[in-house]
Each structure stands twice: as C-alpha cells, then as structure tokens.
Image (cartoon, rainbow, N blue to C red):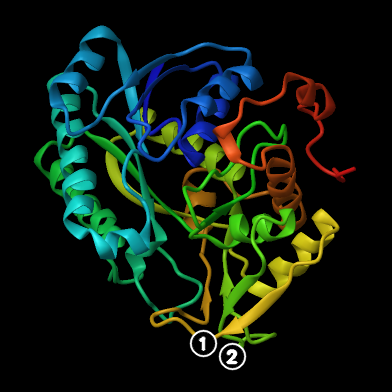
Amino acid sequence: MAILVTGGAGYIGSHTCVELLQKGYEVIILDNFSNSNPEALKRVTAITGKDFKTYNADLLDKQTIIQVFSENEINAVIHFAGLKSVGESVAIPLQYYQNNMTGTVNLCEVMSWYGVKKLVFSSSATVYGATDKVPIDEETTLGAINPYGRTKQMIEEILGDLFRSDQAWSIAMLRYFNPIGAHPSGLIGEDPNGIPNNLLPYISQVAAGSRQRLSIFGDDYATKDGTGVRDYIHVVDLAIGHLHALEKVQSTQGIDAFNLGTGRGYSVLEMVRAFEKASMKSIPYTIERRRPGDAAVCFANPEKARNQLNWQANRGIDVMCEDTWRWQYYNPVGYKETFDKQIVGKTPLHQATGFLMP
C-alpha cells in the first residue's frame, strides 16, 4: 500500500516515515526542502534499511502533483507540508496563506481527480487560540490568533466543505500540542533554522554551549512554580498517532479532528530540570516579562484519540529529554554535516532509554 507523505523530510514527517516503513507501507515523499534537509531522508533509510521514492517538489506546482499521482498507485496521503513558524507568519502572512492554503487546495484537487480520498492532515493546537479552558478537548471553540494558526483553522474548514460536497472522503485532522524529542537512534531529530522557536531545541542548544542562556517569559503565572505549563509529546508517539489515524481513514468515511497530546502539562522549569538530569549540564536562564497572548496553562484532553484511534502517548518527560539530548550531542549542527557512520555503532537502535553522554 503506497502512502504519499507531503513534507516527509521535516521533523514530524521524517519520524512518521520511519514508522510507516517499519510497518511495511510503501512510502512516497514530496518535499520542497524549504525548511527541511535531504540528509534526513538518508537517515530514515539508515534506520529502516528501506528505500523510497522522493520528489523534490512544491505543492504550489500542480503539474508536479499530477506527475506524482500519475506515476504511482497512491492509496492515501499524510499531509505535513507547509510553512510553520508562528513568528514568521506574523511578519509575512500572505506567504503563509498562499503556501499553506493554496498548496492544500491543489493537493486535494489532484487527489480527487485520481480518486484518492483518504487523507490525514497535520493540523495544530494553535487552532484553539488563547483559550483559558483546560484540558482542551475537540469541542473547544476554535479561535486561532496568528496567521499560522489561522491557515490551519481555515484548512480544516476547507476540508469540512470538501467532505460535505463528496462524502466518499475520509479525513482525519490531527491537532498536535508540543512535539519534542527525537528518534532513539540519534539519527533524526528537530533541526530548526536559526534561533529555535520552541523550548526544547533552545534548551538543548544552551546545554551544548551554542547559546548562552534560556529566556523564560514570566514566572508569575498561577502555576506550581510560576512558569507556563504546556503539554509536551514525544515525536515518536506523535508519528505513531499518524499511523493509527491512517488506519482509521482507510476503513471509514467521514471527517473528524483529534487532539494528539499526553493530557499532562509540564512547566518550563520542570522541563529545564528534566533536561539538566538527562544531559548532566547546567541550564542557565533569565526571567523575562510575559509575552502577550501566552496562556498560563495549556494541555490536551486526548480521550477522543484514545477511544477512536486506539492511540495514546507512552513516552514520559525523561525519555523526551534523553532523546533530545542524544540528537543534539551527536548532531551539534543538525543535518549540516553527514552523520558519522562510526557513531551509528555507538548508538544502537535499541538503546532508547537510559542513555548518558560520555
């Protein structure tokens, strides 16, 4: 069974491709590598021992999408491709609307032409906006507060309209909370361009000495230690969630949204302490003013995914931090250097927990 993975070289996409290949799926990747690296795909092959077809292409190029579908017997699509920085989306909103929404419309149009109506869409918890409701369930009112989140919310609405126009479609929209971690092999992980937007990559770069200190925005929230609380989910758990969603869309018709989170919140300082334990490094930090729009507490209610997708997150905070540090330690400049084959022997694939750096 052939699965097209758009954005398959990205952080979540590459981990999902590993899980797909290990489950015996045929994988076809479409990626323009604008915020990913082809080196990630070499490492997916190193982990799985399996090859796959890759197209260096953009979803804004409809003719290339047609080529991909005409050359392959595709059964379903997992759609990750899109611009993904909240801050950047505020600075260049039109590019985000053009890329994320037009690309998705092009993809769905070609899927329809070829009779491929099974889709797993990479959405985001940003569609909920700055809600004070916790835990957040799928019935929470949507209200994205930045252009990135609004592209995800609008795409969900587009997909809803698509299903209402043709009920042969089966669509799962996955709303992620805060993906962190890396593959336990140390071969693939998060490789942000420039200054990291997310907490764990920033903490790991501070631990590695490439950044001086962490800035914590606010220590006067109504939480156990005054710092903001978020739901962090291991990227491998998240990738497995896509396989469960894929199984659902293959066997049903309809459209639905699912939160993918742990249902547990950790504060910024709890994450700092856990990472210090995993890395055996001190993480210096400073306290800054709160950022506008940041909620004190945000975590998922994942019951719907547990009940309807038969999925739940299994990896805890210690494993999340250990795997992040292993990736950072052996890849200090991310994918910019080819992974040393000698390192592969030092970090066997089964060595998923209890890893301490020399």
How far across and down, in percent of the image, does residue 8 sit?
A: 43, 30
- Element assignment for label 1: loop
Is residue 23 in sight in this rendering?
no
Q: Which of marks 2 and 1 is in front?
A: 1
Image point 30% across, 40% down: which residue?
Answer: 171
Looking at the image, the residue that sits furthest to the left is 165
Residue matched to label 1: 289
Mark 2 burial class by Cα count in 10 Å: few <14, some 14-19, many 20+: few
Q: Which amino acid does label 1 sit on?
A: Arg
**Sequence order check, earlier mark of 2 and 1:** 2
The answer to whether residue 37 is above or below residue 213 is above
Image point 22% across, 34% down: which residue?
Answer: 169
The answer to which of 115 and 253 lies nearer the viewer is: 115
How far across and down, in percent of the image, does residue 74 sit?
A: 31, 16
How far across and down, in percent of the image, does residue 144 sit?
A: 29, 68
Looking at the image, the residue that sits furthest to the right is 358
Q: Which amino acid does label 2 sit on?
A: Ala
Relative horizontal placement of residue 295, taking residue 150 as reference (left or right)? right
Q: Picture quarter containing residue 124?
A: bottom left
Which quadrant would the N terminus be assigned to in this image? top left
The answer to which of 4 and 87 lies nearer the viewer is: 87
Residue matched to label 2: 222
Image point 50% across, 36% down: which residue?
Answer: 244
The answer to which of 8 and 137 lies nearer the viewer is: 8
Image point 44% across, 38% down: which residue?
Answer: 245
Q: Picture quarter containing residue 118?
A: top left
